[in-house]
Image (cartoon, grey):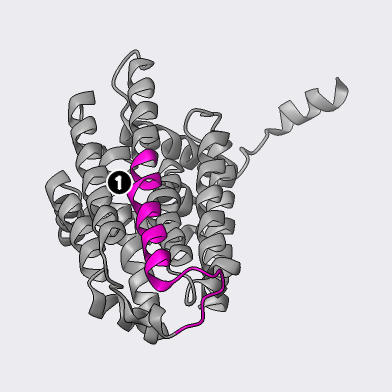
Amino acid sequence: MRSDASLVLLTAGIVYTFGWLRLRQTGNVRLANFGRLFAYLGGLLTIAIALMSGIDELQPYLFWVHMVQHELLMVVAAPLILVGWPMPFTLWGLPPSLRRHASRLLAHDRILRRGLDLLLRPVIAFAISTLTLWLWHLPAAYDAALANNWVHNLEHVSFFGAFILYWWVLIGAPPRPSRLTSNAARGLYLLAGATQIALLGGLITLSDQVLYTHYLTVQSLTGLSALQDQQLAGAIMWFPGPLIFGIAAALLMRDDEGREEPYQPVDELRRGTNGLEARHQAEAAPAPAQSHTSTSVSAKA
């Protein structure tokens, strides 16, 4: 997966950055700010670290390293990418014809819009992320992923995709603002997500038998037994994961207190994109023809 992932990540980074630069030309620095750029690129870097570093080399031998890999994808990379508002900047990084086609599709395809609306309902997004996490941690599914690269890649994609939905509901990246409009709603949503992750981590940590037989068949690289390795992996899910959710809650509450008025990302995106379209149309329009008289006057001046 390394070569495929590197190509996808590189392309995503280039297209996004080009779109960010184009939108920044509108002068709307609130839309195309450096915080979003760094968040998005940081998310891509986190994916690269998870999938293309020593972590990926060690995860077949150490369960706790495998758990770190999954945590990076679900609770670090996914929210960082969404904080970067990938949709508008990626669209503006595309060639004009492709951008217009994609924009029309997003704006007018009822099936796509209704499907996205359904997936981004808080209960639905939470259910998908929870079921995805728990089903893949069933022993048969987890061992199957470790035994087959295609299944393993599917596991990673489904973890990342499911938690993109989870965090999208919370962050409200364009084109769909968050339905969670109060601190209480956001807090409950974060608490639910942190609780289900902590519960699964606790069950793995406190199990008195090895759940995933794959790790009984490989040589330990650290001197830990398979059960000790499993306990460490469970602890990594049990504690750091919910801690990240707590940090996210604090940041969201602080951000909400600092707003003087409700922030409408779709409205701001519309203002930024319309401004850039107007500028491009003005640049593309032919210069007005000068009359002979005005040219003569200019020449004499």
In this rendered view, identify the residue nearer to me: 124 or 270.
124
- State the image coordinates of residue 257 (x, y, percent, origin top left): 34, 16
In this rendered view, identify the residue nearer to me: 145 or 277.
145
- State the image coordinates of residue 232 (x, y, percent, origin top left): 41, 58
Which residue corresponds to the image point at 27% horizontal and 51% vertical from the top-left? 197
The residue that disc 1 covers is 168
Q: Quadrant of the C terminus?
A: top right
Q: Is residue 222 magenta?
A: yes
Q: Is residue 191 above or below residue 106?
A: above
Q: Is residue 269 above or below residue 198?
A: above
**Left or right of residue 286, residue 131 in this image:** left
Helix, strand or loop at mark 1: helix
Which residue corresponds to the image point at 56% horizontal and 69% vertical from the top-left? 222
Three-letter amino acid code of the residue under disc 1: Trp
Which residue corresponds to the image point at 53% horizontal and 35% vertical from the top-left? 35
**Left or right of residue 25, residue 227 in this image:** left
**Left or right of residue 174, residue 66 in this image:** right
Which residue corresponds to the image point at 56% horizontal and 29% vertical from the top-left? 27
Q: Is residue 87 above or below residue 260?
A: below
Is residue 53 visible in the rendered image? The answer is: no
Q: Is residue 60 magenta?
A: no
Q: Is residue 93 above or below residue 222?
A: above
Q: Residues within 10 Å of mark 1 (few under 14, many from 20)?
A: many
In this rendered view, identify the residue nearer to me: 51 or 99.
51
Q: Which residues are magenta?
A: 218-243
Is residue 260 visible in the rendered image? The answer is: yes
Classified by dominant secondary structure, the portion drawn in magenta counts as helix
- State the image coordinates of residue 38 (x, y, percent, origin top left): 57, 42
Quadrant of residue 63 in the image?
bottom left
Q: How many marks?
A: 1
- State the image coordinates of residue 268 (x, y, percent, origin top left): 38, 31
**Left or right of residue 249, residue 85 in this image:** right
